[in-house]
Image (cartoon, rainbow, N blue to C red):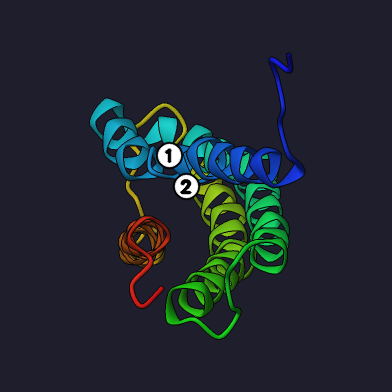
Amino acid sequence: MTVFAITAYEISVWLHIVAVVVGLGASFSFAILNPVAISMGPRYLPLVHRTQLTISRYLVNPALVLILVTGIYQTSDGDWKFGSFWISATFAIVIVLGGLVGGFFMPSDKRLGALVETEIAAAGDGPVVLSEAYRRGQRSQLIAGQVTGILIIVAIFLMVVKPGA
């Protein structure tokens, strides 16, 4: 009697889901990190940018790679077609997310972190006044973060519902 008959495909699905939950789930915390830091005071903002950069580097990026690799494997090994809308759309979303993380969020966190550290140092022991450049960068991150969250939710919907499958 076989108690544990686990296939490579099932392991792939498990890894795929874990990557989504751990890697991409962590990115949803970004939406609350900035407002919490601002409510506590601008001197907490460098920690926000370092935290977001670290989560992107060590959770989100590896998760996106794992999602892509396991998705390719599952499509190849399973009864799926790469040309199916829901598969093509989710692959496109993963690629767009990777581009946003590597091309926008990580450079933005590096730049904004350095900028706010400079502004804090310039304030000395006095109140920190955030520059318009910093505020503009924050707004850009907020908008891109909302788009990213929607893309993740759409990808999950497509993976669960599989329209046209």
Q: Are marks 2 and 1 in contact (CB under 8 Å)?
A: yes
**Residue farthest to the front?**
1
- Disc 1 residue type? Ala
146 left or right, relative to 86: left
Q: Quadrant of residue 42?
A: top left
The residue closer to the viewer here, 98 or 45, is: 98
- Above or below residue 45? Residue 75 is below
In the rendered image, the vertical position of residue 3 relative to residue 67, given as above or below:
above
Quarter of the picture holding the C terminus: bottom left
- Name the amino acid type tagged 2: Glu
Give x and y (percent) for residue 23.
Answer: 56, 41
Residue 118, percent from left and from top:
55, 47
Secondary structure, mark 2, is: helix
Disc on res. 119 = 2
Badge 1 local density, few (<14 within 10 Å), some, or many (20+)?
A: few
Question: Which percent across, then down, holds residue 9?
Answer: 69, 47
Instruction: Point out the residue furthest to the bottom here.
Output: 83
Residue under the point 53% across and 66% down = 97
Q: Is residue 48 visible?
A: yes
Depth check: 118 or 104 in front?
104
- Quarter where residue 135 is shown: bottom left
Q: Residues within 10 Å of mark 2 (few under 14, many from 20)?
A: some
* In the image: residue 80, left or right of residue 159: right
Residue tagged 1:
123
Q: For the N terminus, which image quadrant?
A: top right
| Closer mark to the observer between disc 2 and disc 1 | 2
Q: Secondary structure at mark 1?
A: helix
